[in-house]
Amino acid sequence: MMWPGLPAYARSQRTVDRSSLWSSGQHSLLGDGRAEKKGDILTVVIEIDDKAEISNDTSRSRSGSESLSVPHMFGLPQRANGKLPAGASLDEAVTVDSSSGSSGKGSVKRKEKLMLRIAATVVDVLPNGVLSIMGSQEVRVNFEMRELLVSGYVRPEDISRRNEVTYDKIASARISYGGRGQITDLQQPRYGQQILDAVLPF
């Protein structure tokens, strides 16, 4: 994920505040500490507990029958019957029977649970005041790297006074959680097997 450069930010203080015990800035005792401008940091709370169950059952059948006979046609069938082998007749010239049927059944069950917290940075402020946020986190344990990425758009009013926002309040949310390392590599099929799975039709 490409990161845009963060702006150079220098906290300004009014002249009247320099000699006062109380400042009127964002970090004052009674000030609002929620993220509101480019470069501010907020915490994204991810608590996903989803369940999905889908079941489909389909059944279809069809049958047909066609019959063609020529018992009388200017006496031709009778003449032909005399020349046909014993037991053969044109009275029932063509008979076609057909039937087909198909059935299918499928079900899907899925359960996901994920609880994470990650700090994100405000990378842009849209003209309507909506904040564009982006955050990443990497934790390495031995030879395994865990990665967490989050990005999206947040309304300032959805940020709590603790400077936190839940994932369901993030528009166009992109949450990626995964890892790479020796254990992850062992869980993947070998390259030769992947090629055979893609080439072989059966």
Image (spheres, rainbow, N blue to C red):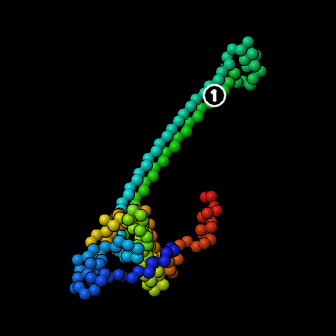
Give whichever of 58, 147 is nearer the camera.
147
State which quadrant residue 111 falls in. bottom left
User: Which quadrant does the C terminus fall into?
Assistant: bottom right
Secondary element at image label 1: strand
Q: Position of residue 190 (x, y in %)?
A: 58, 73
Say which residue appears at 73% left-offset and 12% top-offset.
74
Q: Position of residue 70 (x, y in %)?
A: 68, 19
Give whichever of 95, 182 is nearer the camera.
182
Q: Position of residue 106 (x, y in %)?
A: 45, 52
* Residue 72 placement, left or right of 44: right
Q: Amino acid at mark 1?
A: Thr
Residue 53 sits above or below residue 31 on the image: above
Say which residue appears at 70% left-offset and 24% top-offset.
88
Q: Position of residue 140 (x, y in %)?
A: 44, 83
Residue at the far right: name it: 83
* Residue 122 placement, left or right of 181: left
Per the image, the residue denoted by label 1 is 95
Say which residue appears at 47% left-offset and 42% top-offset.
59
Q: In this view of the protein, can residue 65 be seen by the observer?
A: yes
Q: In this view of the protein, can residue 118 be seen by the observer?
A: no
Say which residue appears at 60% left-offset and 64% top-offset.
197
Give whichever of 163, 119 is nearer the camera.
163
